[in-house]
Image: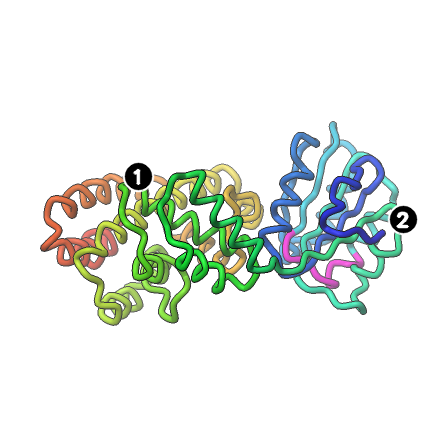
Amino acid sequence: MILKFFELNKINLKQNRLILFYGKNEGLKNDAIENLIKNNGEVLYYEEKAIIEDSSNFVESTLNKSLFEKEKIIVIKRASDKIFKIISEINSKNIEDFKIIINSENLDKKSKLRSFCEKDKKSVCIAFYPDNEQTLSKMAYNFFKERKILISQSIINLIVNKCNGDRQNLINEMQKIENFSIDGKKITTDVVAKLTNLTENHGISELINNYFVRNKKKVIYILNENNFSNEDCVLITRSFLNQSKKILLLTKEYKLNKNIDQIISSARPPIFWKDKEVTKQQIYKWSPENLKLLIYRLSELELLVKKNISNSINLVTDFILDEALTKA
């Protein structure tokens, strides 16, 4: 059965066992899934790759009622037609106590998965197309207004124009700006360009990602190429702190549950799909103990930077290249 994204309220989890969301608007799909699963039983997250690698175990555990003492919802991320045979097998059993929500990127009209969900009366198929600039601009304006962050409309337009119609991309960038603005710092075009993924070299975002995968060679290259100023150092330190805390939560989860794909998929706020692989590497590279120590060091560094702005670039560079990168 085909529905429009604004008809989400027509989905009935008691009647619709298989639900397919497809399209490039990752943010809108994530919002829809969150609203759908809220207070509707236990949720299990899977990546298509993990299911395909051990399909027999996935099918067996799904069909085994002893594992389902109460109703459960299975959410499958980044799915394609490769998973159709597995889904078809499970769906044919007509088991009532579990539902499957599939999140796919673009599926053309020839897609078996899309065709089945469109035609099957008990299934739902919804396409999620990119948001228009007006919708995203209003969303950004409300986000900053609610948080009392002073930002010009021209900067909002800059962020929106670079997000390719994907609200998840926009949310990720707005959260970075929100973290930076905690100290009441002025939001300028230069700040936004350095803080977000909106420039060619990615600046601080790329620096942080390479730091946490311990790519020292790339870190040195980024530091040399970007010519960060003393004024950038509070932003850099704060960004490192935020990422450290985020990875700490994920490493704690990984220590308890070794299913890395499920940890990444169920992370809140959601991890943008382009960052998922690098986030996995970061989890593998760091232990909770080392991250706690790093957070302590970074907190000390932030205070030191604020007291010594004129020498802050040297303080931050030395910290990154020496103590933190080599010992953590």
Point out the residue furthest to the top here: 69
> Which residue lies under the disc numbered 1?
292
Please say if the residues under marks 2 and 1 sit with CB atoms less than 8 Å apart.
Answer: no
* Relative to 34, 168 lies left or right: left
Which residue type does callout 1 highlight?
Answer: Lys
Real-space CA distance between mark 2 and mark 1, rounded to the nearest whole angstrom: 51 Å
Q: Nearer the viewer, residue 286 or 17?
A: 17
Q: Which residues are magenta?
A: 77-85
The structure residue drawn at horizontal position 57% and vertical position 48%, both measured from the top left corner, is 265
* Relative to 43, 282 lies left or right: left
10 Å crowding of disc 2: few (<14), some (14-19), many (20+) = few
* Relative to 187, 32 lies left or right: right
Q: Is residue 144 magenta?
A: no
Q: Is residue 197 in sight in this rendering?
A: yes
Q: Nearer the viewer, residue 290 or 210?
A: 210
Res 71 quadrant in image:
top right
Q: Position of residue 59 (x, y in %)?
A: 76, 48
For mark 2, give the secondary structure: loop
Q: Position of residue 119 (x, y in %)?
A: 88, 56
The structure residue drawn at horizontal position 70% and vertical position 61%, both measured from the top left corner, is 80
Q: Position of residue 277 (x, y in %)?
A: 49, 58
Q: Is residue 214 in sight in this rendering?
A: no
Kindly report which numbered mark, 2 or 1, lies closer to the viewer in this rendering.
2
The structure residue drawn at horizontal position 79% and vertical position 51%, both measured from the top left corner, is 3
Label placed on residue 78 = none
For mark 1, give the secondary structure: helix
User: Relative to 187, does residue 13 appear above or below in the rendering?
Assistant: above
> Which residue lies under the disc numbered 2?
121
